[in-house]
């Protein structure tokens, strides 16, 4: 029996967020019923130390809805330098 969860390749990268921003965004995505994947990233110390950022990907067919939630929460601000530098290459 196949899971109803989207396959890994069906996810579009939304951005890298500070933990506080990620928490707000993930709560809203969950309320909206948008499947997501969150990958905590730490500094180069492996599993030691606090989470520096959280990469968030969302169910590809719902990426425009996820982008709208991002805009409602954070305005047009992009969550990090990488997102703003590679704006034309974003999935959302």
Image: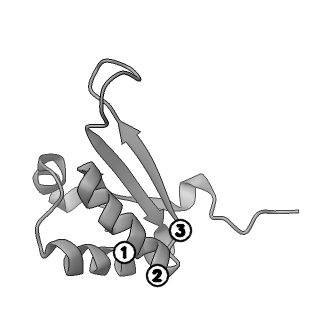
**Number of other residues with Cα within 10 Å of mark 2, as a class: few under 14, some 14 to 19, many 20 or more:** few
Q: Which badge, 1 or 3, is on the more N-terminal residue? A: 3
Marks 2 and 1 close (CB-CB < 8 Å): yes
Residue 34 visible in rendering: yes
Marks 1 and 3 close (CB-CB < 8 Å): no
The residue indicated by pointer 1 is: 66
Residue at the (42%, 58%) spot, across then down: 57
**Number of other residues with Cα within 10 Å of mark 3, as a class: few under 14, some 14 to 19, many 20 or more:** some
Secondary structure at numbered mark 2: helix
* Outermost residue toward the top in this view: 45
Residue 62 located left or right of residue 55: right
Q: Pinpoint residue 85: horizontal percent, then vertical percent.
A: 11, 51
Asked if residue 45 is positioned above or below residue 36 in the image, the reply reads: above
Q: Which badge, 2 or 1, is on the more N-terminal residue? A: 2
Q: CA distance from mark 2 to mark 1?
A: 9 Å
Residue 39: quarter of image? top left
Residue at the (32%, 31%) spot, across then down: 42
Residue 63 visible in rendering: no
Marks 3 and 2 close (CB-CB < 8 Å): no
Label 2 or label 1, whichever lies nearer to me, is 2
The residue indicated by pointer 2 is: 32
* Outermost residue toward the right in this view: 1
The residue indicated by pointer 3 is: 35
Secondary structure at numbered mark 1: helix
Residue 66: quarter of image? bottom left
Q: Pinpoint residue 64: horizontal percent, then vertical percent.
A: 36, 78
Residue 11 located left or right of residue 22: right
Q: CA distance from mark 1 to mark 3?
A: 10 Å
């Amino acid at each position: 029996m196949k899971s109803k969860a989207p396959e890994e390749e069906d996810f579009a990268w939304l951005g890298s967020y500070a933990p506080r921003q990620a928490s707000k965004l993930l709560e809203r995505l969950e309320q909206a019923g948008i499947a997501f994947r969150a990958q905590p990233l730490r500094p180069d110390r492996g599993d030691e130390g606090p989470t520096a950022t959280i990469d968030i990907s969302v169910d590809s067919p719902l990426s425009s809805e996820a982008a709208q939630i991002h805009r409602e929460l954070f305005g047009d601000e992009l969550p990090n330098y990488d997102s703003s530098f590679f704006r034309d290459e974003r999935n959302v």
